[in-house]
Structures are given as C-alpha cells and as structure tokens.
Image: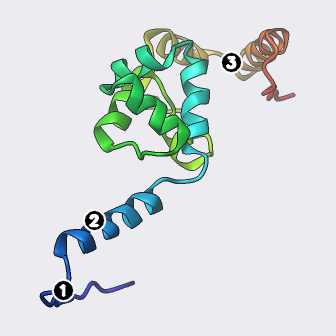
C-alpha cells in the first residue's frame, strides 16, 4: 500500500502559483480521461435512441458538454455519471469497457416479474424458457445466445 506524504512547494517571486496549479490541473484532467470513454458514451446514447442534446440534458449537461465528453476532450463528473445510470446507461461499461453484471437492485417491473417466475419454475421449464429467449434474441440479431442443455 502506498502512503501519502505531504509536500511543500516553494515559489519565489518569479514563479506563478496560478500557472503552476493550472498546469497541474490540466495534467490531472488528461489522466482522468480514459481511452475509449467518449466512444462508449456515444454507443450507449445511440443504444438508448437519443441525440446528444436530449441525452445530455437528461443527464444534466448541455449538448456542447455532451459532445466534449464523446470526443474525449472533457472528462465526465460524478453527477453526470449518476444521471446516466438513472437513464439506464451501463456506467461500468462506459468507464471500463467491460460489461457489468446485472444490477439486481435496479430491475424494472418486467425484469423483476420474469425473474420471479423463472425462480419458481422447474429446471426443465427454465431451460425451455432459456432456449426460447435465445431464439428470440437470435431472430432480433443479438449475438449473445447462452443456452443450457
């Protein structure tokens, strides 16, 4: 584990505190913008069928800010990411590039009803339902066809 140690920065009359801090903030900002976040934001926006203006406003930012996030020239903050999660965006995917496991605490009423019924079914009936869902997903052009035999 790393320890955090305080440091002292000494400026003389030729140094500009504001310039130093500004350059450090720019460096931190560049580090915070992870590669691919903007592209994944765009993918999630398009998956939800929203334009930049509506998507941004729904998450609490302007179209210009949304565009900057998607271009990777600006880094989203926590309030924005929280707003995205409320819209149904997979924020874990946006930030990391990997799909998160299903959030069982945030199921829709339909998902909850399906899961409740699934849990009451026999194993054979669950397998039939799984194959049926896989067939529907395949017909819709979705690629994830997990089945059990």
Identify the residue at horizontal 81%, vertical 25% (top origin): 143
Residue 140 in the image: x percent, y percent?
Answer: 79, 10
Disc 3 to disc 1, C-alpha distance: 78 Å
Seen in the picture, residue 28 relative to 54 is either above or below; the reply is below
- Which disc, if any, is residue 22? 2
Q: From the image, tell me which residue sits under label 1.
A: 14
Percent x, y of residue 57: 34, 19
What residue does disc 3 label? 122
Q: Residue at x 33, y 44 (%)?
A: 77
User: Taking the image as drawn, is residue 98 in sight?
Assistant: yes
Residue depicted at x 49% and y 10%: 113
The answer to whether residue 82 is left or right of residue 99 is left
At mark 3, the secondary structure is loop
Q: Nearer the viewer, mark 3 or mark 1?
A: 1
Q: Quadrant of the N terminus?
A: bottom left
Report if the CB atoms under discs 2 and 3 are less than 8 Å apart.
no
Q: Secondary structure at mark 2?
A: helix
Q: Is residue 97 above or below residue 138?
A: below
Residue 4, quarter of the rendered image: bottom left
Q: Position of residue 58 (x, y in %)?
A: 35, 18
């Amino acid at each position: 584990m790393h320890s955090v140690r305080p440091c002292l920065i000494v400026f003389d009359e030729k140094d500009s505190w504001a310039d130093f801090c500004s350059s450090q903030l720019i460096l931190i900002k560049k580090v915070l913008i992870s590669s691919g976040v903007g592209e994944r934001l765009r993918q999630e926006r398009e998956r939800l069928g929203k334009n930049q203006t509506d998507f941004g406003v729904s998450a609490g930012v302007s179209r210009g800010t949304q565009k900057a996030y998607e271009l990777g020239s600006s880094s989203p903050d926590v309030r924005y990411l929280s707003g995205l999660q409320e819209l149904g965006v997979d924020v874990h995917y946006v930030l990391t590039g990997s799909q998160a496991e299903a959030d069982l605490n945030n199921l829709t009423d339909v998902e909850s009803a399906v899961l409740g019924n699934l849990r009451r079914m026999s194993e054979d009936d669950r397998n039939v339902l799984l194959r049926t869902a896989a067939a529907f997903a395949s017909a819709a052009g979705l690629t994830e066809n997990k089945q059990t035999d």
